[in-house]
Every structure is written in structure tokens, then in C-alpha cells.
Amino acid sequence: MLLPYRPPLAWHPLLSFLAARAIPGVEVVTGDTYRRTIEVAGQSGHIEVSREPSRHALAMRAWLPDSRLLPTVVEKVSHIFDLAADPRVIAAHLGVDEVLATRVRRLPGLRVPGAWDGFELGVRAILGQQVTVKGASTLAGRLVTMCGHPVASPSAGLSHLFPRPADLAAADLSTLGVPRQRRVSLQTLATALADGRLSFTGHGVEAALDALPGVGAWTVQYVLMRACGDPDAFPASDLWLRRSSGASSTSALIARADAWRPFRAYAAMYLWQAGA
């Protein structure tokens, strides 16, 4: 299928962001193509996505046991690649800001990478606390091997589905290689999803995440930004955002970012790109 987008699209920065954070066994980025295993309504498959720039579209191939799952897959893939964004509107708003103007001109069409699943992104964000991006991916791959579901895939590197909330909630994570408090955070998140106390759709997501142990403001905003598609989410405590913006403190950055509303998530991507 061809999934259209509004040009321009900064494809390689988007793909590079996903590649750096790819979960071993679940996601693979090679060349200009993104691949991953998927599960919809209890049925597994896999997808691959590449770009058709001359047609302003992404080309998606999906291997599914039931064609009725396709609309859900299209919706999720569109979210991963932020295809609903209107880059001209975003650029018109952010491009007049003295901190962002040059970056917006140099990198038109920058998107906010989404996620296939809110739980997967939440787990990845918790694993990323106080470790490098590469270290978090290693931990995520280890978690997948421990409690993910093996699948057969003809695509090299795709071997597992990401763990389901109930499976992670019941798993023994003592050998995962993270502090005890982080294991508690992961399993509390999984339990909240498994028993229905938390959902990544609808209202109340921010308050529900904020109530979880070991989930601070940065993690909450990062999840809102990528899992929930909130264009104004902003992880203001992020050290690189402060450095890249020239703000002297988190409070100064929050005040500075007020001019970027309602597209603070896109402003964050431009500031992060400066250090990519």
C-alpha cells in the first residue's frame, strides 16, 4: 500500500531516530527500510516500510493472517511516521523563532517519531532512564528474549513479538540488569495495562503515568510525545534540550518554550537533531 504524506518529509532523520532506538528482535532498520514484527487482535505478522518520494508516500508491505487487520496496521504505521502532520503549518509557526529558525530551514519536514504501541514505548522509555540510547536498546532486546513471543519471519533480525503486558507483569526480571526500582516501574506499568487501569487512548493518560512509581516528568512527556502523538508534549528536564536551546535552567526552558506552543514536541525534535 501507499500511505500519503504532506511534503516535505525529512525521511532520513526520522529513520535514523528509529534505527538508533530499534528493539533487537522486534525492529530492524536497513538502508532506507524499516521492518518490524507486529501483533493485532492476538494475531502476529510483520511489516516493512520504505519511501516513494516521487509520489509523496510511504510504501508499506504487510504480512498478515487476516486482511481485516489492515486498517489497524495502516493507522499504527501512520502514527509511527507521523503522516498526519502538516509540516508547512509547523514550519510557519516555529520558523520565526530565533532559536529554531535556522534549524527549521535546514531540515524541512521533520517529524515526531511515533510508536507501534504505547506499552512498548513506555517500557522503552523506562529502560532509557540514566543509560545511553544504545544501552537502552540492549536492555530492550534482553527483555524481548526473556518474555517476548518467538515468531517465524522470513525477514532477518525479526524473531519475536514485543512482550504483552501480562507476560511482563508476571516475568522474573531479576537478571535483566537494571536496578530494582526500575524493575518495579516496568512491572507496575505492565500490571496497570493488563488490568485496564491504564490506557494510552483517551483522557487521563498523563495523570495515570505520573502516578506510577519511578516514572518522572521526562518519561511522562516523552511517552505523551511519541506514544500518544501529543504535538505539544515537551520533556523540559532533558539536558540536551536545555543546552541546545541556550536555556540556563529547566524553568527558563519552559518559559522559552511557551512561544513554541502548540508544537513544542516538534521544537524538541529540532533541538535534539542538533546533537544527533
Image (cartoon, rainbow, N blue to C red):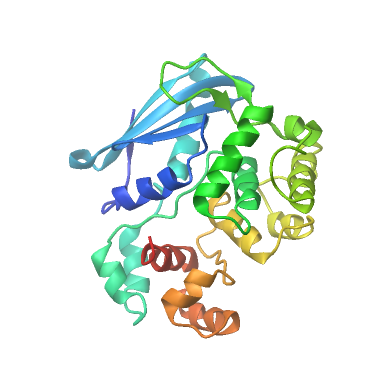
Using the image as rendered, state which of residue 158 and residue 67 is in the foreground: 158
Residue under the point 58% across and 26% down: 161
Left or right for 228, reference 192: left
Task: Estimate the x, y position of residue 119 in percent, counting from the top left.
Answer: 65, 42
Q: Quadrant of residue 2?
A: top left
Q: Is residue 177 above or below residue 241?
A: above
Residue under the point 73% across and 34% down: 168
Residue under the point 52% across and 86% down: 248
Residue under the point 30% across and 70% down: 103
Tell me if I can see residue 206 in this picture.
yes
Left or right for 34, reference 171: left
Number of numbered callouts drawn: 0
Which part of the image, by quadrant, shows the N terminus?
top left
Which part of the image, by quadrant, shows the C terminus?
bottom left
Task: Estimate the x, y position of residue 214 in percent, counting from the top left.
Answer: 75, 58
Tell me if I can see residue 262 in this picture.
no
Task: Estimate the x, y position of residue 33 in percent, counting from the top left.
Answer: 33, 34
Q: Is residue 255 above or below residue 91?
A: below
Using the image as rendered, state which of residue 206 and residue 149 is in the foreground: 149
Task: Estimate the x, y position of residue 43 in percent, counting from the top left.
Answer: 59, 19
